[in-house]
Amino acid sequence: MRSNFLPSRLALPLLLASLVGCATSGGLEPVGQLAPADGLAARESLAGHAAEGAAFPDIDWWTAFGDPQLDALVEEALRGNPSLDAADARLRQASARAGLADAQRKPTVGATAQYSGLRIGETVAPEPIGGQYSGVELLSLGFDHSFDFWGGKRAQWEAALGQARAAEVDAQAARLSLSANIARAYVALAAAYDDLDVARAEEARATGLQDLSGKRVRAGLDNRMQLERAQASVASARQQAQAARQRIDAARNAIAALLGQGPDRGLAITRPTLLQAPAPGVPAVLPSELLGHRPDIVAARWRAEAALRGIDASEAAFYPTVNLKAMVGLASIGLSDLFRTEAGLVQGGPAISLPIFDGGRLRARLDESDAGFDLAAADYNGRLAVALREVADAVQGASALDARIATATEARDAADQAWQLATQRYDAGLGTQLDVLAAQQPLLQLDQLLAGLRAQRLVAAIDLDEALGGGLELPAPASTH
């Protein structure tokens, strides 16, 4: 009898072993690859802009503009903002998921107290079994643990941990983006005030020309054409001033919204006192060192590594799993007998399971994991290329704007000399007031041009600081694949 029983107990494991090849991961693998940073040619484009001793921005890069009000606005925004709250909530959510994945790797112990009653009718079983009610009290302590021989659960935990680290970097990226957007809105506010100054000066000039033209028309020295032109110039200058005031209001409202406040908060923002933008320069260690400073690149790298761990977890699902369950407890029909020695109950043992035919579920899951890595790798490679383009655009744009500002300043100095000369000739009785007003017009136009160029130069400096990562140092994962 015993000799016949043993072969029957081995039959099922042998059958399982014979069918191991039915559920297989063969032929499935990702096709994407993470591009090396130095593989993207950028040294020649950036070489002319690599300043001696240039470094990555400071963590509080906006202080380089020398405006205490801007410093206070950025600090206020970073203390609490709805967009930052959302990023922090996503971080907590990802951290909780990582904690859940870690908990799946550990044994579980649980206690149970149970009462169960049963009465079998006499039509089913005669007395003494039928017609009697019996109750069973059960107290038990259970143990459950699934051994991670193939590293699948560890891979799931590492994937969740990678996603949590990516969310942490995303929170830093949100702070960098917020501070940069505040700085840009602040520059727009400063530019609107400069445009208002020029519009007011132009209105004063056009009003003087209108008064002079009116006198000449009344004296019969001129026709009404000049007067009509002067009146049009006055109206145009007033329209420019109105447009500048509208931009001031819009910039204040934008800053208030970035602070997470209502538009009334913007009314307390005074005129900016921004200094000259810093000279453009990039560190000589680009592009490789950019990986640890750009939060979007670091986050994309973490997500790619998390996707690789997800592939490992999907592959581990093809292998056998070993689970150990045990239970100790007390059971009796009567409560008075529950704590007697005879009431002891022990149950336990290992269980082995192996996927054989699953309708392609495991292969589909692995294929999905492979595609997830390909998608993450493509996102990382794309962000790396965009980052280098943004650095090049910002530093090249800043250098070009410096050259344009220098040329416009020369033209403005020449126009100022012409205006002063016309004023001196008028004071000496050698020229007319009309000559003075005419010479002032190109000077004001160049003032407006310079104001716009300086604003663009400040924005280029902000763009460069943001493109270089805003002073953040974020360790990226070292891939093991």
Image: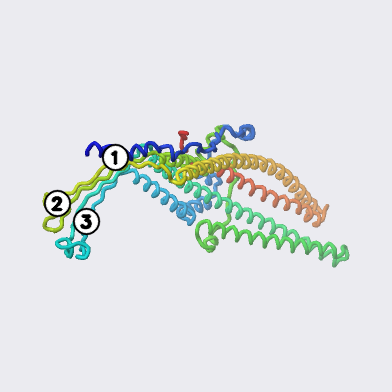
Residue 51 percent coordinates (x, y) = 59, 34
Instruction: Report the coloring of the rendering.
Output: rainbow
Amino acid tagged 1: Ser
Q: Earlier in the sequence, mark 3 or mark 2?
A: 3
Marks 3 and 2 sit apart, C-alpha to C-alpha, by 14 Å
For disc 3, the marked residue is: 113
Amino acid tagged 2: Ala
- In this rendered view, identify the residue nearer to me: 35 or 74: 35
- Label 3 crowding class (10 Å Cα cut-off): few <14, some 14-19, many 20+? few
Residue 300 percent coordinates (x, y) = 51, 43
Q: Earlier in the sequence, mark 1 or mark 2?
A: 1
Relative to residue 334, is residue 160 drawn left or right?
right
- In this rendered view, identify the residue nearer to me: 437 or 473: 473
Relative to residue 221, is residue 291 drawn left or right?
left
Q: Is residue 434 above or below residue 390?
A: below
Give the residue drawn at x 33%, y 38%. Answer: 13
Please identify, in this view, whether the residue under mark 3 or under mark 2 is nearer the observer.
2
Give the residue drawn at x 22%, y 57%. Answer: 114
Relative to residue 121, is residue 240 drawn left or right?
right
Image-quadrant location for residue 39: top right
Q: For mark 3, give the secondary structure.
A: strand
